[in-house]
Image (tube, rainbow, N blue to C red):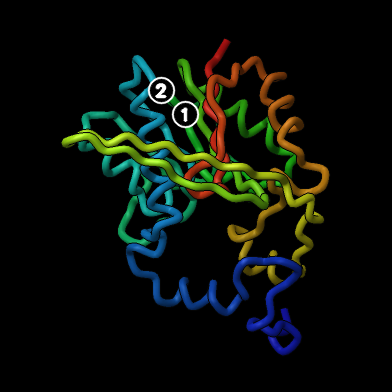
Amino acid sequence: MNDKKFDKTIKCFDEPHPPIKIEEYIDNQKPGKFLNKAHRDSYLQQMLWIKSCSGISSIFEVGPGEGFCATNLRKLGYQYETLDKFKVANFEPDYNQSFTNFSADDHPKKYDMACAFQVFEHFPYEKFKENILKLAKISKRYVFISIPYSCYGFSFNVSFTFNQKSYFRKIGFYIPTLKKNRKYREEYMKRYPWAVHYWEIGRKQFPLKKILKDIDELKLKVIRKSHGENPYHYYILCEKI
């Protein structure tokens, strides 16, 4: 690749970050990059939804990032194992390998829940059903995922406090952007394959109903779905039929 033709300060299409920002993170990797309000709310939602599921003691997560959920849920007594090709900050995945080469049939264990948050958009959509099926094969009961949702909208919070008890309710309204799918430069895809979003819910050709239909065809029942506190993260919790 000719770096002279690759201006790393320029974003491509609607990439969220110019390549130079990604390289700065790689070169100066420090724990806590994803400890911000948007991701904090998502971590909490993931843990609360998991905690709300009955009969859960073992969990398998693909792409745990810095391991916030794994670390905290292990402290609550869950058996929580992780798989990732990359080692991020100070977190070591239990299985250091690519999910592309992961064989659910050969994996030595099964878990009460298998999950992947903000992971499957990094694969072409043609791999979506195959990836979900891998999770379903190693799960005894639940499959839990989140996917980016390209949307516009608004929300407001309502809270009521009486003595030491507080009640919270978030009301939101979101619509898909229907933006074109991202088209990345070839040199970008070669250098940062883990940063590429091949698809997102809400973009053209990827309505939510398409994703739900493909999940249904795998004999999984969607029991809960919604935007997260960060509406860009859309959660789908399924149960095996």
Residue 38's mark? none
As drawn, 201 above or below 112: below
Amino acid at the residue labelled 2: Tyr
Residue visible at 70% across and 38% down in the picture: 127
The quarter in which the N terminus is drawn is bottom right
Q: Is residue 237 left or right of residue 165?
A: right
Which of 145/133 is in front? 145
Residue visible at 81% across and 56% down in the picture: 180
Q: Residues within 10 Å of mark 1 (few under 14, many from 20)?
A: many
Amino acid at the residue labelled 1: Ala
The quarter in which the C terminus is drawn is top right
Residue 38, image x and y in percent? 45, 55
Give the SS element for disc 2.
strand
Residue 104 can be seen, yes or no: no
| Label 1–label 2 contact, CB within 8 A | yes
Which of 150/168 is in front? 168
* Residue occupied by mark 2: 111
Residue visible at 36% across and 24% down in the picture: 52
As drawn, 101 above or below 87: above
**Location of residue 3 (image quadrant):** bottom right
Residue 51 can be seen, yes or no: yes
Residue visible at 32% across and 34% down in the picture: 167
Give the SS element for disc 1.
strand
As drawn, 215 above or below 170: above
Residue 156, image x and y in percent? 49, 47
* Residue occupied by mark 1: 114
